[in-house]
């Protein structure tokens, strides 16, 4: 099932830095600000698409959906946290091996950390197109951002000031988030390189001033970040990005794996927008704050590379492989507006409340599982355009306006063989 715990915070209690706090059950937490609040741990579970449960919490108190909605509408509460979609493996596209498929499922991941007095705040490059399309994927342009010019350049480990965003080394600045270009900030004042786990994490919500901690970043379409520390949150938080050390310099966190900030994802998944208007597809920043802020601006008439990963060779959370998860906004919602937690143009229909999710990940047997399903755990919004998967997929998978998803109302999942390719077409 797809379980979600919606975290609420008293609106007046927000501050410039928030300390993430956990909750037992599942996914979002809404917290009332309090000093020396006790720690609770939210468990991570492997779940599948069919069922959905949403729970609203204010501190340790459960809030009814009606009360939560009323409080949000009146500005009495704000939502904090992150949803992670679930995934249902489909029939394999070819004869399968006998190996376990545990690394082919999407796991629900929740963030936790120690706290004292603040409230919490809240994953490319295919080079070939689908057999159903002859249009080469293009690179998205973000007028509000800079960067992506030195994608193949080695990062100068320990040389750049923490106040410098590393756009010359492939990172894509997300200026519209107000975080100095970074996709997420996780301050860890007590962290040491010898630590096996990190117990105190503050989530930054404004531009950093060189504070010690982990600075996460976006990469261009079809690329994924390479950097995150081996030490993760001691109660289950994911932590991602490069490290701002005590000397105010930026360090690689996986220099033994890559000297670069971004690397190409597994090729073979292309988004083609055949509509007369654009839309945006937003990936969760994972590992990291898990906000859906990594942008793909699917402008009208364009083709775009959708990042995919070999799950067992990417970020591993508590021994479990992970996948990439995306939020699909309605037509007309660009990345600057839609690839953030709250979308001002349609607060109940985009951003965290986008109507549809897409999940992708390559299993250990080489099969990529691609899932399209409603974001029904938190949203009642309805997508206003069609989504069709075509190419080397094992079974049909689509969403059609007025008809819904192929397979069932819970969505559809299809498999792509190793070396295969598909096109995800957006149409009216």
Image: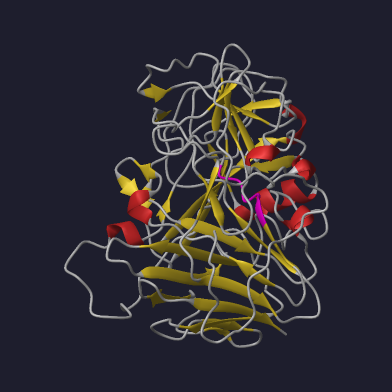
- State the residue in front, 57 or 402: 402
Whether residue 10 is visible here, answered yes or no, is yes
**Magenta segment main secondary structure:** loop
Q: Is residue 366 rendered to the left or right of residue 69?
A: left
Q: Residue at x 64, y 80 (%)?
A: 135
Q: Quadrant of the N terminus?
A: bottom left
Q: Which of the 4 quarters of the picture holds residue 295? A: bottom right
Q: Quadrant of the C terminus?
A: bottom right
Q: How is the image coloured?
A: secondary structure
Image spot of residue 332 (x, y percent): 80, 69
Image spot of residue 18 (x, y percent): 64, 27
Q: Which of the 4 quarters of the picture holds residue 140? A: bottom right
Whether residue 50 is visible here, answered yes or no, is no
Q: Which of the 4 quarters of the picture holds residue 290? A: top right
Q: Residue furthest front?
A: 153
**In the image, is residue 404 part of the stretch drawn in magenta?**
no
As displayed, is residue 116 above or below residue 2? Answer: above
Image spot of residue 256 (x, y percent): 39, 33
As displayed, is residue 216 above or below residue 372? Answer: above
As displayed, is residue 225 above or below residue 252? Answer: below
Q: Is residue 364 rendered to the left or right of residue 393?
A: left
- State the residue in front, 251 or 356: 251
Q: Residue at x 27, y 63 (%)?
A: 101
Q: Which residues are magenta?
A: 290-295
As displayed, is residue 62 above or below residue 198? Answer: below
How many discs appear?
0
**In the image, is residue 292 part of the stretch drawn in magenta?**
yes
């Amino acid at each position: 099932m797809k379980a979600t715990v919606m975290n609420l915070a008293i609106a007046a209690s927000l501050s410039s830095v928030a300390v993430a706090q956990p909750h037992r059950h599942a996914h979002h937490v809404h917290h009332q600000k309090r000093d020396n609040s006790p720690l609770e741990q939210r468990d991570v579970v492997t779940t599948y698409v069919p069922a959905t449960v949403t729970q609203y919490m204010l501190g340790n108190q459960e809030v009814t959906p009606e009360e939560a909605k009323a409080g949000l509408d009146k500005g009495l509460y704000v939502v904090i946290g992150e949803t992670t979609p679930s995934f249902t493996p489909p029939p394999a596209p070819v004869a399968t091996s006998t190996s376990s498929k545990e690394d082919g499922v999407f796991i629900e991941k929740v963030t936790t950390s120690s706290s004292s007095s603040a409230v919490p705040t809240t994953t490319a490059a295919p080079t070939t197109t689908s057999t159903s399309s002859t249009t080469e994927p293009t690179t998205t342009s973000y007028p509000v951002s800079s960067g992506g010019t030195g994608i193949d350049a080695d990062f100068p480990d320990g040389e750049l000031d923490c106040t410098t965003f590393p756009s010359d080394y492939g990172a894509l600045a997300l200026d519209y988030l107000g975080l100095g270009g970074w996709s997420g900030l996780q301050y860890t004042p007590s962290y040491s390189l010898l630590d096996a786990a990190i117990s105190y994490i503050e989530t930054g919500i404004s531009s950093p001033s060189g504070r010690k901690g982990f600075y996460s970043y976006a990469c261009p379409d079809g690329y994924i970040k390479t950097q995150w520390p081996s030490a993760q949150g001691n109660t289950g938080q994911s932590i991602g990005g490069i490290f701002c050390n005590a000397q105010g310099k930026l360090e690689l966190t996986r220099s033994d794996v890559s000297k670069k900030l971004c690397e190409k994802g597994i090729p073979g998944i292309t988004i083609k927008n055949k509509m007369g208007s654009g839309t945006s597809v937003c990936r969760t920043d994972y590992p990291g704050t898990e906000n859906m802020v990594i942008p793909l601006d699917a402008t009208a008439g364009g083709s775009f590379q959708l990042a995919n990963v070999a799950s067992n060779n990417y970020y591993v959370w508590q021994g479990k492989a992970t996948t990439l998860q995306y939020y699909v906004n309605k037509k007309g919602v660009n990345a600057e507006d839609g690839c953030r937690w709250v979308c001002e143009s349609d607060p109940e229909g985009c951003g965290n409340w986008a109507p549809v999710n897409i999940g992708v990940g390559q299993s250990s047997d080489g099969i990529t599982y691609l899932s399209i399903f409603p974001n029904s755990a938190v949203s009642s919004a309805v997508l206003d355009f069609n989504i069709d998967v075509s190419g080397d997929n094992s079974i049909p998978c689509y969403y059609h306006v007025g008809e819904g998803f192929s397979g069932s109302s819970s969505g559809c999942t299809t498999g792509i063989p190793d070396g295969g390719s598909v096109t995800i077409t957006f149409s009216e």
